[in-house]
Amino acid sequence: MESWELIIIGAGSGGLAAGIYGARSGLKTLVIDEKLAGGTAADAPIVENYPGFPQIAGGELAQNMTLHCKKAGATIHEIETVTALELKEDKKIVKTTRAEYEAKAVIIATGSHYREIGVKGEKEFRGKGVSYCGVCDGPFFKGKRVLVIGGGNSAATTTLYLSGIAAEVVVTHRRDAFRAEEALVKDIASKENVQVFWNTEVKEIRGEKFVNKVVVHHKKKGETKEIEVDAVFVQIGEAPNSQIAHEAGLDVDEHGYIKTDVFQRTNVAGVYAAGDVTSHPVKQVGTAVGQGITAALEAYSYIKRPYYRR
């Protein structure tokens, strides 16, 4: 069993920031992620207003953070899934699909996953016209007609990205106004190839081998009709990846987010959480980075100065 001082589960913005500060503090630090490092930021077409970068491609920002983390001295294991945690003892055990590791402190930075709308056809056509990542799959639909579902920042940024690729972008939102930032809303309004259906919900996704239409329902008018589209991009938010942590004894709120204090401490000594998996109300790259830094510095204090903040 390999021994580490600090193990960070998740290599998104929060996990990579924790890795940088853990390694810089002199801790033997391992970062594990079931996917490639970078997290959901890597899926974002554009990240706006991250301090120092008015605009930067999400993939570029994620790559820069990953390289920085490695340069700081952290070890990153990609494509390795954590299957179980034992967090009650002084030595924490992290079990993965490859090995078992021992650590003095653990930071949970597992982020979130895309929410599904739960309608007929969604699962059947996933990867066949149904997507949850505009930057990943948008280029496949150049010159086509695509649909975006949602009204928050993720839906708005995806709509703007797709408007530069697709011939036409249709947006359905169940409310009568976007919840996105005003600057994004103004940009959408300026796009001639974007059409928005307010108070409208998608009820079914149809197709043959691939998506070719959706059934939508206008809540106020009570009307149901079909819209022909070549792809559906679901952008209705995320849900926390907290199941394994909860099974290991960490407290979560009614929505499944891990509870932490201002120092990112959980209810288990020596275990911290950072980023979108936590109950912090603001889900942004900047807040995840700040939480990751805080968690790493608290982990350092827990390991090297055990009398501190106990």
Image (cartoon, rainbow, N blue to C red):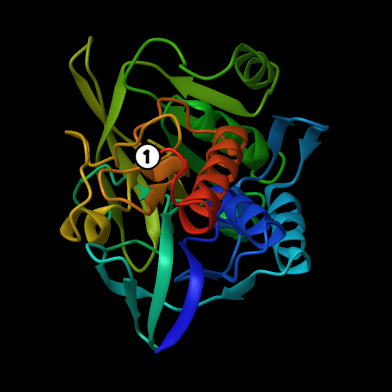
Residue 59 visible, this orientation: yes
Write the residue at 18% across / 54% down. 249
User: Which quadrant, please, contains the N terminus?
Assistant: bottom left
Query: Tag 1: residue type?
Result: Thr
Identify the residue shown where x is 39% and y is 37%: 237
Q: Which residue is drawn at 67% across and 63% down?
A: 26
Q: Name the residue under label 1.
A: 278
Left or right: 198 as drawn, with respect to 184 = left
In the displayed structure, 283 sits above or below 41; it is above
269 or 244, which is in the foreground? 269
Q: Is residue 22 above or below residue 229?
A: below
The residue under the point 78% across, 34% down is 55
Q: Using the image as rendered, state which of residue 226 and residue 150 is in the foreground.
A: 150
Quadrant in the rendering for residue 150: top left
Query: What is the residue that sits farthest to the front in this orientation?
Result: 307
- Dot 1 falls on a residue whose secondary structure is loop
Crowding near the residue tagged with mark 1, few <14, some 14–19, many ≥20 C-alpha atoms within 10 Å: many
**Image position of 15 with respect to 27: above or below:** above
